[in-house]
Image: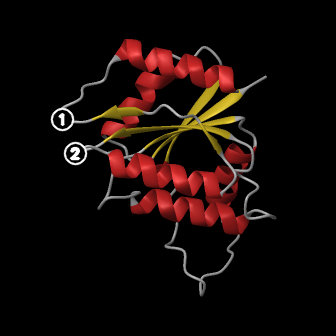
Amino acid sequence: MHKILIVSATSGSNLRLAKRLEKSLDIEKEIVNLEDFIMPLYTPKVGKVNDEKINDLCSKFSQSNGLIFCAPEYNGGSPPILTNTITWLSVISNNWRDAFLNKKALIATHSGGAGVRFLSTFRIQLEHLGVIVYPRTIMVNKGNEFNERSAKNILNGFRQLL
């Protein structure tokens, strides 16, 4: 059985986007809002910590077959909360790629700007972690409203990838 973890980097527009996408999926899924998993900023001095919330989030990633990321573009790239989360997941697992290796992912954004830079830079980061990234993305911004029909088509294609 396939399970998709829908990851929202924010509790605003991207969480609303995540919930809209969740409604269009007819397989097992769970939404996590990264703002509910407050983690310290990772630095080498902090090192590994035994934090229950980080371990729980790492388990959610490891137990999923597919990942959908909903995040805004920040300064031409990923939002800090998403970067910090990925760093923690990579250092807390036994092998730094355990939470990502061979997972299938779809990237979506609801951004104040276009969001294109987030979509492209985050794709590169996920591929580096061993994720198989679906080629189509979902992009919502001031000039591009959410298109339910298009989103359903993209989600159906993503589901076939699983």
**Sequence order check, earlier mark of 1 and 2:** 2
Q: Amino acid at mark 1?
A: Lys
Residue 1 in sight: yes
Question: For numbered disc 1, what is the local secondary structure?
Answer: loop
The percent position of residue 74, horizontal first and vertical second, equals: 32, 57
Does 5 sit above or below residue 49?
above
* Element assignment for label 2: loop
Residue 35 seen: no
Circle 2 residue: 112
Taking the spot 29% from the left edge, 62% from the top edge, the residue there is 75
Apparent side of residue 59 relative to residue 120 in the rendered image (left or right): right
**Which residue is at the front of the view, 162 or 71?**
162
Q: Which residue bears the numbered disc 1?
A: 142
What amino acid does circle 2 point to?
Gly
List x then y, in percent, for residue 59. 73, 49
| Percent x, y of residue 21 | 46, 24
Give the residue displayed 35% in from the left and 34% down from the top: 139
Which quadrant: the N terminus? top right
Farthest residue to the bottom: give it: 45
- Quarter holding the C terminus is top right
Answer with the quarter of the image where residue 28 lies.
top right
Q: Left or right: 27 with respect to 109?
A: right
Q: According to the image, what is the colour scheme of the structure? A: secondary structure
- Examine the rendered structure and indicate whether residue 54 appears above or below residue 140: below
Question: Label 2 neighbourhood size at 10 Å, few (<14), some (14-19), many (20+)?
Answer: some
| Residue at 61% over, 65% down | 88
* Image point (36%, 31%), residue name: 16
| Camera-side residue of 51 and 105 | 105
Question: Is 65 situated above or below 44?
Answer: above
Asked if the residue at tag 2 contacts the one at tag 1, i.e. Cβ–Cβ closer than 8 Å, the answer is yes
